Amino acid sequence: MAKATAQKKAKRAAPKRTQLVYAFGKKTDGNGTMKALLGGKGANLAEMSRIGLPVPPGFTITTEVCIDFDKNNHSFPAGLEKEVEKAIKDIERQGGKKFGDAKNPLLFSVRSGARDSMPGMMDTILNLGLNDKTVEALAAKSNNPRFAYDCYRRFIQMYGDVVMGVQPEDEHAHEPFDEVMEGLKKEVGVKEDTDLTTEHLKELISRYKALIKKKTGASFPQDVFKQLYGSVGAVFKSWNNDRAILYRRKYKIPHEWGTAVNVQAMVFGNSGDTSATGVAFTRDPATGENVIYGEYLINAQGEDVVAGVRTPHTISKLDEEMPQAYKELLEIRKKLEKHFKDMQDFEFTVEDNHFYMLQTRNGKRTGLAAIRIATEMVKQRLIDWKTAVTRIPPESISSLLVPIFDMDARKKVAVIGSGLPAGPGAASGKIVFSADDAERLSDKGERVVLCRVETSPEDLRGMLASEGILTSRGGVSSHAALVARQMGKVCVCGADGIVIDYRRKTLTAGSVTLKEFDDISIDGTTGEVFAGYVPTAPSEVNQVLAGKLKADKSYTYQIFDQVMKWADRARKLNIRTNSDTPLQATQAIALGAEGIGLCRTEHMFFDGDRITSMREMIIAQNDKDRQSALKKLLPHQRSDFAGLFKAMKGYPVTIRLLDPPLHEFLPHDDTSIRALAEKLEIPQETIVERVKALHEQNPMLGHRGCRLGITYPEITEMQARAIFEAAAQVMKLKNAPKVEPEIMVPLVGYPGELKNQVDIIHRVAAEVMEKKKVKIDYLVGTMIEVPRAALVADQIADTAEFFSFGTNDLTQTTLGMSRDDSGNFLRIYQNLEILPANPFASVDTGGVGELMRIAVEKGRKSRKKIKLGICGEHGGDPDSVKFCHEIGLNYVSCSPNRVPVARLAAAQAALGA
Ligand code: ADP
Ligand code: MG
Ligand code: MG
């Protein structure tokens, strides 16, 4: 015991690491796992050196030195210079060149490199070590004076800019070095930088020096060590420049990490026509195809390739231009993947036909590429299936499921505006402004895009009939977005640059005005809106699932299927779907759903003539009238439920009793009120009065949820009857599937509320079973969607056989924040970092999540086998799925299209990724 403590102490008191500088090249101190100390770039330069790739030698000054430098008033720690000088000596010995030597000078690049790649930090300084003497040596040695002086002027420019601070005075001013260059070019009458002769470059150099002197009062340093330490200090300081701080804040990179500095011997891609510089990926990062991908420029240096001054060649052309280097490139590609076991994004330079590696890292890729690369790497035995599963961002699965634009056709139409990408995929069709028109035209076989300022439940039919939905108002959690996600519809919402005028029937974006029935296209993946028609096709995966394409004809489907099989092997959570119709349910099953976690019965009341009966029920002044209206609704509900039970093929179905405030079902404008009055043969005033009476100040917290069923028990009774009669009916079919209704009471806060509703359900169940002579296995349970329910979950679990977390309302009621009104301030909150993420998209684990934990614990305490699930929108959010796994839920439920995403997220949670 005493010994263990002593050891611990010794560990904590261990002296700070003493090594400040790590060499790479022939002799390498570090390795690829040391990213925290050496930065990503430094660690991988070391790793590449270790596996024998041609890396120009150099050394990395650690991130710890950066932190120390920061703390100590921008001074270097004792001992740094000694280590640096020793490292330089080693490099000199390896290559025969000497730093600052007037005959055979060694030049360096100085490069920043944080743990994670961080654009916004210091620009790389190249050609360090050139001065008035060494430049002559380089000119003589290379037999190419123009090259030498070009390197020198580039170095002075970079050094003057990033180390000495010769920069534009304000954002309107030109780059001062560029101005000098342009001035000279004009004077001597040349257009391109490359047209400047050696003599011109010498003149440019002296003007650059004069500029530095004028702006800073100091001279450009001729001492190469002064150049070196000046540059290293500048890299360290750049860790705290505004751009870098902003970037870290945005991507949540801790300020304490610091950056490393890499000092590396220069190789020259700009020393003639047998030299080049380039960037490449070991596979195609867009499609994932297993081919080398990249570009290069002959006779170029540094960022020329990405700077866009000259157009680079695609990498395959290197085969013709430098066959030897190309062969080496392909060898290196193989080695990189074999070693790093992931697709690499690398930078290289060819000097006089010799190939050098300057950087490598795991490459960024599209969703499609992530899936393809992971599955193919398993096939190649580079990685195992579990690694593959953890490598694919769950979200990327959805890119395999959405309809796609024909890319060539898309290029030919104009982008007229943009909104939030709320439902991924591509949609194209005629503009319609109302649900009626949407239905009417689509019945005739037309493709339509429903364009609304915003949508309401009354638009649902129209949304269903449309290829896509465009709204000019509302965020990613608006009604349109929500429904679009559930129905898997393409949706662009909140396109606030677009004006929709219902009266004139026009849609205006800037100078473009489109009329009703004009063609429009929307891209719900990017949020773009196009004028004109762009052909689309359903995703291959959906074509296979719908039986329209053979699996062996679609590679996309095969990799999708493979990933899903692996995910199912790993995951512990069950995945259910939120579906209200047999069609949605069938789609969800095809996508892997194992039950319905939420069937919203109210959606069933909007179809066709049912809304009239529903309205009749609401308008009813007495029980008798209400009963008679409910009687008309009963057969509709029963057949809907029967359809669902059949479609679900034995999987459980959770049905939620009526939830929304009744006024949502009533007509609000004069025309629809008049129409309803005629249909029901009652005076218009009666309807107007009823609408008024049902008006609520705060419907979200008003007469809704189980409060409806408690005040109008006949509604609950009708719904329960419809459910049980449907169950009985399906159970009597030939080859009947198992039927397992789970009846869910919404918005419960008091145990008594649930008890009240459950008594009705049990009574009706007994009646139906008695009458139909069947035994129906069913469960009764509740949503947990107000904080009180979570806090008294043990008492509620006395009655409830399952809980389903309704995290949409639970978030609203826990935060006291209306989802539909949060658009005005949530974004500002996120910018100010008050909130880490949108709590309506990703479970607020600290608050809402804590209530969920309490409910799980209390629920299980009073009913050990209680079934626990989630049915809020969060059920399809990967982070939330992981959270649900952690707190031990049995299942998550999400919209059909999110099912594959949830399967993958659940697998990753189980694999601890
Ligand atoms: P970034 O992080 O912005 O990519 P780098 O440190 O990788 O910056 O440097 C940018 C470019 O500078 C490299 O892609 C390479 O072309 C060039 N470069 C860096 N070090 C050297 C070197 N030792 N020799 C030749 N070119 C170099
Ligand atoms: Mg750069
Ligand atoms: Mg780089």
Image (tube, helix red, strand yellow):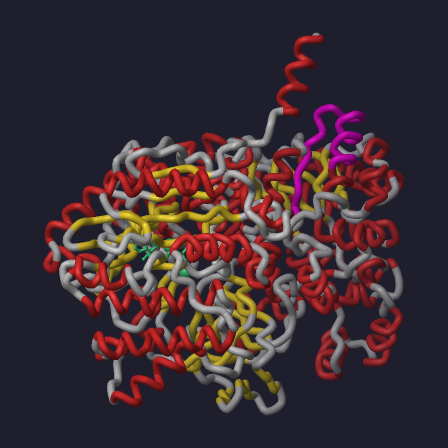
**Residues in magenta, as a range:** 853-871
Quadrant of the displayed image that contains ligand 1 = bottom left
Residue occupying image coordinates x 64% and y 33% = 886
Residue 14 image position (x, y, % from top left)? 61, 25
Quarter of the image for residue 460 reads bottom right
Residue 493 image position (x, y, % from top left)? 58, 70
Residue occupying image coordinates x 47% and y 34% = 568
- Could you tell me how many numbered marks the image carries? 0
Q: Is residue 631 left or right of residue 328?
A: right
Name the one closer to the observer, 316 or 819: 316
Residue 565 shows up from this direction: no
Q: In which quadrant of the rendered image does the N terminus lie?
A: top right
Q: Is residue 390 magenta?
A: no
Residue occupying image coordinates x 54% and y 43% = 65
Residue 662 image position (x, y, % from top left)? 79, 63
Residue occupying image coordinates x 22% and y 66% = 147
